[in-house]
Every structure is written in C-alpha cells, then in structure tokens.
Image (spheres, grey):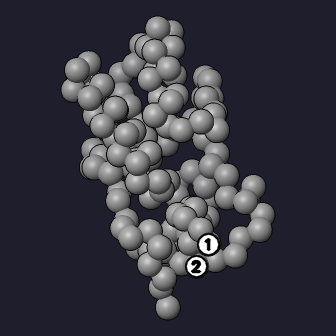
Amino acid sequence: MIKEYRSEKKTSEVLDKYFQEIFQNYEIKSLFYTKGPGSFMSIKITYIFLKSISIVKNISLFATDGFAFNNNNPIKATGNFYFVKKDDKISTQKMDIKDLDKLRFNLPKVLDKTIFSKDNQPLYILPAVKEID
C-alpha cells in the first residue's frame, strides 16, 4: 500500500477527486475493487466510474466481494440488517451489533491478486432487508 484514502462523504462526492490525484501521481495498470455487497448506489456509482475508466484508458478491471477486506464479518445493509457470507453464499440477517468498529474494512499492505477476478459486475443483493430464518 502506497497511500490510503478515507472519507465519510458519499462516494459520488469523492471518487472523481481521489482518482484525479491518483492518475496525476501514479501510472495505473489495473484497477481492483470490491463489487459489493453494500450500498446499492455506492456500488453502482463505483462500478460505472471504474468501468468507464477501464474502457477509456484500456486498463484491466478486477473485483472481489467486500468480505475479503473485513475478515468475513457482517457488512451493514440498512437498519439492523447486515449482509453475511457463509459457505460462499451471501444473505441478509437481522442483527444487533453494538461494536461497529469490529466491522471496519482494512486494506492490506500488499494486495493478493488471486482473490480477484475479471467477473467485475456489481454484486447487487436486493432486497437488502430480507430477513433469513
């Protein structure tokens, strides 16, 4: 990892700003992103943005699910609902999680490219609030 970007702002407010800086300072040969699950709009904006860059600049785009970067912990959906991954199947469950810091995403110091694939279509799981028995 060379540099980490964090923001509490919406994806649509920071994505282009960060990438302007990235492309000014680095030679980008491939793009790697988490395709979901998560906020429907954030996933959609990120995918369209990165897919457009990959086409225009002829850069490969790779993706994996977000569980690869949060130690396979639940991912916030909405309200008390969370996305969970068990046996490679992602579903939603109602949970009462008080310590949200344990659910933070952490980027690795070195990216393991083997967990990514060219299957980079967004991972939309709708409805995000379906309760699993």
Instruction: Locate residue 42: give its quadrant.
Output: top left
Which amino acid is tagged 1?
Asn
Tell me which label, 1 or 2, sits earlier in the chain. 1
> Residue shown at 37%/65% (left/top)?
125
Q: Are marks 1 and 2 in contact (CB under 8 Å)?
A: yes
> Residue shown at 37%/40% (left/top)?
45
Judged from this view, the residue extending furthest toward the bottom is 133
Which image quarter holds the N terminus?
Answer: top right
Q: Residue 119 in the image: x percent, y percent? A: 27, 49
Does 128 appear above or below 106?
A: below
Which amino acid is tagged 2?
Lys
> Residue shown at 28%/49% (left/top)?
121
The residue under label 2 is 94
Q: Of residues 117 and 57, which is closer to you in this image? A: 57
Q: Which mark is residue 80?
A: 1
Q: Residue 131 in the image: x percent, y percent? A: 48, 82
- Using the rendered image of the protein, determine whether residue 69 is visible from the camera's viewpoint: yes
- Using the rendered image of the protein, determine whether residue 85 is visible from the camera's viewpoint: no
